Each structure stands twice: as C-alpha cells, then as structure tokens.
Image (cartoon, rainbow, N blue to C red):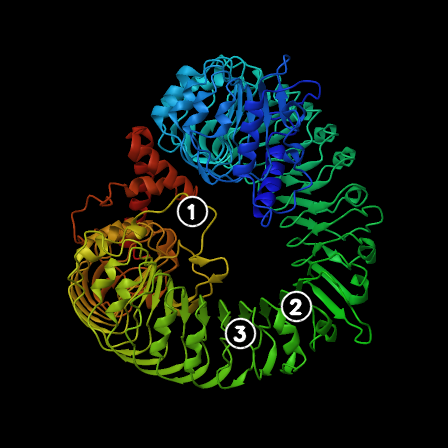
Amino acid sequence: MGCSIICLSQLFFLVFLLHSQPTSSSSFSSSSTLSCSQEQSSALLKFKRLHSYPTSSSSKYSDDCDQKKESWKEGRDCCSWDGVTCDTMGRDVIGLDLSCSELQGTIHSNSSLFLLPNLQQLNLAFNCFNSSISSGFGQFAKLEKLDLSSSQFSGQVPHELSKLSRLSSLDLSGNKQVSLNTSVMRRLVQNLTKLRELRLDGVQMSLVLLDSLMNLSSSLTVLSLNGCGLHGNLPYNIFRLPNLRELSLICNPELRGAFPTTNWSNPLMFLDVSTTGFSGPLPNSIDNLKFLKHLGLSQCNFNGLIPASFGNLTQITELDLSGNNFVGELPSSLSNLKNLYFLNLRCNKLTGSIPESFGNLTKVTYCYLSSNSFIGHIPSSLSNLKDLTFLDLGGNNFEGTLPDFLTKLTRLTNLDLNSNHLTGQIGEFQHAKSLEILLLYNNRLNGSVPKSISNLVKLQKLDISSNNLSGTIEFDMFSKLNETDFLDLSYNSLSLSINNNLKYTFPKLKDLKLASCNITVFPYFLRNLSLDTLDLSNNRIKGQVPKWMFKVLESLKSLNLSHNSLTSIEQIPGRNLENLDLHANFLQGTFPVPPSSVVFFSISNNNLTGEIPSSICNLTSLQILDISFNNLTGTIPRCLGYLSDFLSVMDLRTNRFHGTIPEIFAKCKSLRTLVFNHNQLEGSLPQSLVNCRKLEVLDFGNNKINDSFPYWLEALPKLQVLVLRCNRFYGQIENFKAISSFAMLRIIDLSQNNFMGHLTSNFFEGLKAIKTINENEVPLKYIGEDYYQDSVMVVWKGQELKLERILTIFTTIDLSCNKFHGQIPKVLGTLQFLRELNLSHNGLSGYIPSSLGNLLVLESLDLSSNMLNGSIPMQLTSLTFLAVLNLSQNKLTGPIPQGLQFNTFQNNSYIGNKGLCGFPLSKKCMIVEPPPSEEDNDLKFTSGFGWKVVMMGYGCGFVYGIAMGYLVSKSRKPQWLVSLGYLVYKSRKLQWLVSLVKGE
C-alpha cells in the first residue's frame, strides 16, 4: 500500500518539475493484431509472477497507475497485453511499460526479463524493488530508452549500463540510495554517444569528479542532476552544448560555477541552478538564450545588478532570482517580459521604487518582491495585473496608503504587505472575494477594521497585528469566516467586544492571537474551539484561571497569558502543550509544574514561593526554562541535570536559592544560556560547565561564590557574556592555556570581587571579538534565538542597566572594585571595538597608556580611584563617541587636553587629582608645554593611525575624518592632505597655548 502512495506523490513531483513536458519514457501502445513468441510470453508471465505483490498484501491500485498486469493472461497473445509493444512482424517484444505497477523484489542477472533481447524501450518507474540495479540491464544491446526512476533501487550504478550504446534516454532519478562514481560516469559519457536525455536526480554523485562531464554527448537535450551532492566547479562547456534544452542542477549546495560571459547561445528553454554555490554577477550574454522559458537562480550567491538585458528574454514565463545578493533598482526592461506569469525576487538587496511599467506584465499570476529595500508607493499600474493570484511585497519600505485597487483584484488569493510603512485606513474588500491569505501586520495602518472582511468567506489567514488600528471591534464580524485557521488582531489600540451569548464555532481555527486587545476576562467562546495556539498576553485579565479553560488547554500546543494580572492557576493540563508563557503576572503560591510535553516554559516576574518541586525533572523535552524574578527558595535540584540533552536556556536569576551549585552539567550539549544572578549561591563554580560547548551567556553575578578565576572556561568556543560581579572570587587572572583565550567574549564583568595581581596582557590579547567586527553582521544581530532573547544587567556609564536584548556590537570590560595593581596594559589599545572600560577602584599605577586613543568607539572610560600618575594623553581627545569620562581620585598632573568631547566633561571627571589644571577646573596652568606622558611625544596612535588625520574630521564630521584616515593610512597618500590637516591642528594648538599664557 505504501508503494502506491510513493508512486503517486513522486509522479506529481516529476510532472511539476518537468513543467508538464513529456517524460523520456512514454507509454508504449500495444497491438491486438500481432502475435508474440511463446518464449517471450512465458518470460513476461514469470517476471510478473516473481515481482508482483502477493494477493493477500496487495494494495488497491492508485487511480493514476494503470492496472497493466490485469490483462496479462496465459493463452492470450502478449502483444495485446497492456504495456507491451511488439515489432511490426509481431514476434518480438520491443517495448515494455510497467511503470507504477506495484512491482517488488530483486531483479537478478538471470531474470526472465532479460530474455527479451530485442527490447528497445523499458519503463520500470515508480515501483518498489528495494534492491540494486542489476548488471543484466547491460544485455539489452538494442535498448534506446531506459527508465528506472523512483523505484527504490540502491547500490552502485553498474558499469554494464555503459554497454547500451544505442541509448538515447536514461532516467535513474528518484533513487536516493543509488550512487555513481567517477569511473562509471566516465564510461557512460564515453560510450553513450547517442544520449539525448540524462536524468539522475537524487542519485548520489558526491564521489564524481566533475571533469568527467566534460565530454557529454553533443546530442544531449536534457541534463537533470538535481540533489546529487555534486561539488566543485561545473565545467563551462556544459552551458555550450549545442542542443541542450533543459539544464537542471537544483539543490547541490557544494556545486560552484558561473555563467559564460561570451559565446553563450543554445536552445535552452529550462535553466535552474537554485540552491547551489553559483556566484558572481549575471552576464549580459544571458539575453542570447532567446528560447528560455524558465530561469531559476534562487538561493545562490549571485550579486550585482539585475542586467537590463533580461528584457530581451521575451519568451520567459518563470523567473526566480530569490535569496541572492542582487542590488540596485529594478531595470525597467523587465516590463518587456509579456509572457511572464511567475516572478520571484524576494530576499535580495534591491532598492528604489517599483517601475510603473510593471503594469505591462499583464500575465503575471505570482509576484514575490518581499524582503528587499524597495521604497515609495505601491504603483497603481499593478491594477492591470488582472490575473494576479499571489502578491507578496512584505518586508520592504513602501509607504503611503493601502491602494484601493488591491481590494478589487478578483482573482487575488494571497496578499502580503507585512512590515512596511503603510498608513491610512484599510479599505473595504467588496470585490476580493477570492482572498485566502491577508497579511498586513507591522505597518502604520489606522482607523477601524472594515466590516467587509466578514464577507471574505474563503479567508484562511488574517493578520493585522502591530498597527495603529483603533475602536471597538465586534467579534461577531469574524463569525462567517469558517475557513479561517489563523487570526491575529494583536498590538493595536482595539477593544474587543465579545457577545458571550453567541456560540462562535470557527471550525478550522487553530491559531488565535488577541494580545493587547483590552480583554478583561477569558472569552467564553474559547470553550467551543479546538486551538493549537492561543495568545491573550498584554491584556487586563485578572484573578484565577477558570476551570473551564482546562478543556481549552487540552488541545493547545502554545499558550501565552503573560503581562496580565492573574493571581493563580490550579493546574496546567494539556498533553500537547509545548510553549507556555505565564511571565509578568501576579501568580502566587507554590511552583506549578507544566505537562511533560512542554518545550518552552516562562513563569518569571511573579510572586511564586517555596522550592522547585522535583517533578520539574519530568520535563524531558524542556528547552527553555525561565523562572527568574520570583521568591523561590531552597537549593537547585540536582535532577535538572537530567534535562541537559535538550535544555538550551536556564534562567533562575533574582530568587533566593542557596547552597552550592550542583555538578549537573556533564551532558549539557545544548545549553546556550545559564543565568543564576542575584541569589545566595556559594561554594565554587562547577567545572562540569566545561562540557557546555554551546554556552554563550554565563551569569553568576551577585551571589556568594568563593573561587579563583575560572580560567578553564576558555575552552568554551562560543562564550560571549561572562558576568561574575559581586561575588567572592579571588586570586590572579592567569593560567591561560590557549593563545586565543575567550575569543568570542564581548561582555566581561568581574567587578566587586577580590581579584588581585597584575592585569596580564595575554588575557586581553585573546579577546578577538572586541578586536575585530564581523562585517557580515548587518543588520545588527542579537545574542540568542528568535524565540528567546537573552538579557543581562550591566553597569553602563555609571548606571545599572538591564539590557533586554544583547546586541553583538555591545562590548564592555568591567574589572572595577578589585585589588589589581601595576600598570594598565598597552594591549588594551588593540580592543578597537570596546565601548566601555571600567578599571576604577583598584590599585593601578603608572601612566595612562596613550594606546587607549585607538578605542575609537569607546563611550565610557572610568579609571577613577587608582594611583595613576603622569599627564592625560592627548590621544584621548580623538575618542569622539566618549560620553562618560572619570579620571578622578588619582595622581594625574599637567594640563587637561582640550577639544572634541573633552570640552564637554565637568569637574567631577577630574577631582582628586591635585596636579591637574586647565578647563574645566578652576586651577589655571602656568606652563606652556604639558609634561610628557608615558611615551614620547610623537603624538601618534600605537596602531599607526595618526591623530593628525582624525583632526581633519573635526568640524566636518567624525565619519569623514575616519574615512580620510583610512585612505591615508592605507595608501600613504595624498601627503598634501596630511600636511593640510597638520597645519589646521598647529594653528589651533597655538591658539590654545596663547590662551594658557593669558590665563583665559
């Protein structure tokens, strides 16, 4: 029975893939007037008998599979049997079509099938042989067409197939367990010189060297190698095969290549290299493919502009360039593609507006332009696309009102305009009666929800969340939407009015999201629904969860009741529940344990008391556990170690847990975030944490942990946040074994401990993530996953701040309030992307390193309450982003540097340094030249980036100064620009010295 289903599904896929083109192995007509030999008739009956399913286990034939074997009766002429073709003399079987005939078993080399020596065409596709391809197929010396596709063959392709020198069509596709090596491939290419169609989709060819494809038959019209595991560079000459009409290389991620830039002209009609490693800009020569109807380049690495020459591909009907790096505006020449009905340009970096001329593409039925950077209004000319069925413009920067014509396209079934800047009201949908999907979320739409939505009786998904819609909305208006399975009205200014006397059925509704809809009680109609997802968060629901809701919970997979005023929930039933969010309520009492099926569980920011029950350790599917900000007590259960296989987030911060941290991390292969901050934990850090190789966030701050610095954490390759502040750690920070220790660390807070000794250079040298920035992290990225964003408490610019989400560009080092002594290491100046540095309240001495002037994005620098001496380096004036500076309570001397950010700092940045003078202090400087700092007075950054160059940007903008500095430092030219910048600086320096002498 399973085989019949496989036949049908694979047949549909094949038909779709080939776009209704006839397959290489067409059905053979039989003759009722001819007579085959008894020998061949017996051979066929024996093959049927050996390879048919037993009667007792045979399934019903699929409607799309011919019951060919039913006509195979002993005593009847085999030339009259279905699927059998004989020659004109009526003696020899020359064609056999047993496709989708529920055949099974191994075809041995002595099979009776091979007693048909004159066979020219053989089709065994869509069967279930579950065996290797027999070498006996090589005996068919006259065979011209062989189709063994989707018949669950396995093993190596036998080299005997290369003996079929007359073969014009070979189809082994859909046999995922079949593999092909280079040796056999070379033989096939060398001997099958008449081959016109070669289909190997799904055959494993990862061991095939691609140069074996160099000499493919010039007669080849079809080459289909989808999902074959090809790797390396595709030979150029394949694109120049003179008769090639179809080339399909879909889903070979390791396959690299580029299109010819010249001499590219053949009768290609179908070209698809989607999901491969093809790259580079598209050549203008692509317009030589005058007969091209399908071009698929999705999910590759193409870049550059979309060539204007695309407009010459006038025969094209399907164009898919999605998931690449194309830039620039859409060429207006695309409007010449009058036969285009499928257009997909989503997920690129395209800009500009959509040309009005797109209205000429009147045959377009599917149009996907989402996830780009298009701007402007949605052109009214799109109203000419009367056949438009799918329109996806989501994730762009379109503005203006929602065009009225979109509500009048009678054939439109899918409309997606999410995440733009659309304003105004949602129009009345009087004519768009075919709409099945309407996604308008995350815009700036206002006004009321149009009542005409209730007439969209075919609507399956409606999402108008995250807009500025207002007013009272009667839930009755959705009662006619019997086909709707997804409804989201969240995050507007709507007030939902629900008539509890009406019985809402919504027979297909599975996902209901009503967050921030001013709901005060649980809607009673929920008891009539069988939902998968329910979101009632950010409402005003108070008190206890009613018992009738337990029936609703039985079917739910996801429930969000966060940000309400719930006080208790007696139990949490539900065998299917996976996501449960109860955080930010007023829940009291003991810890409620969710069902064992739960994957995500957050009950943070409540008033829970008591201990964590041991039954929590039955949650063997748990991945996210957030019970932070409660009043829970007791010790951390050791059985939490049983959850380590899947657990990725454990957040227990701000409770009253005590005792030692148990060694529960032996198998923490998935743990990414571990936060125990602000409890009463003591003892040492469990060294089993070294097993948590995926750990990114580790926060044990504000406890009573008594241990030396955990240098062994350097073995965690992904650790980005390390917070140990306010504990009892002691000793020196040393004993590093790796050259690049803590290479991914971005946030380091070791403040308020008892660390001592020198600040070792090798610790800072290993912080590669703060030395360099990943240019690919655009747009900005957050630490964590989409379903859970990490947060952390930091002291930022002197104030305690909770980062609700942690940007990867946020970098800070806080070693304050310890007992470090000695000099500040110069290597700190190499941390070019450090944003905050706090070394205050230690015993550091010596000069302030001038290399700190290299920290060009530094926003906060606190070196206060140390024993630093010497002058303040002039290089620090280049820190244009510096907003907070605290050098107070040291032994600094000399004039305070002037210029840029230093002109904004007040007295409290410098108090307690009796030797300092100049603005903003009242003490005037009596010297002409400032005393030397730690190094000589060459006034250059240690990185070689001269401060003179940055001064060029003063008055013209920081970005300009940095850009010119980069130009000078890389090219050493133009020298006149350096000289000019230096003269500007000297003139200002002279004015400063004069003002000092005058006492101004």
Q: Nearer the viewer, residue 894 or 496?
A: 496
Which residue lies under the disc numbered 2?
516
Q: Amino acid at mark 2?
A: Ser
Residue 777: which numbered mark, if any? 1
For mark 3, does the 10 Å Cα neighbourhood hold few (<14), some (14 to 19), or many (20 or more) residues?
Answer: many
Whether residue 797 appears in this view of the structure is no
- Please state, as top left, top right, bottom left or bottom right, where the C terminus lies in the image: bottom left
Give 791 or 345, whichever is nearer the viewer: 345
Is 257 or 305 nearer to us in this picture?
A: 257
Q: Mark 3 highlights which residue?
A: 583
| Drawn side of residue 516 relative to residue 992, left or right | right
Q: CA distance from mark 1 to mark 3?
A: 31 Å
Answer few, some or many: residues within 10 Å of disc 1's Cα (few below 14, many 20 plus, some between 14 and 19): few
- 434 over 528 or under it: above or below: above
Q: Secondary structure at mark 2?
A: loop
Which of the 4 quarters of the picture holds residue 268?
top right
**Picture layout, residue 698 above or below residue 5:** below
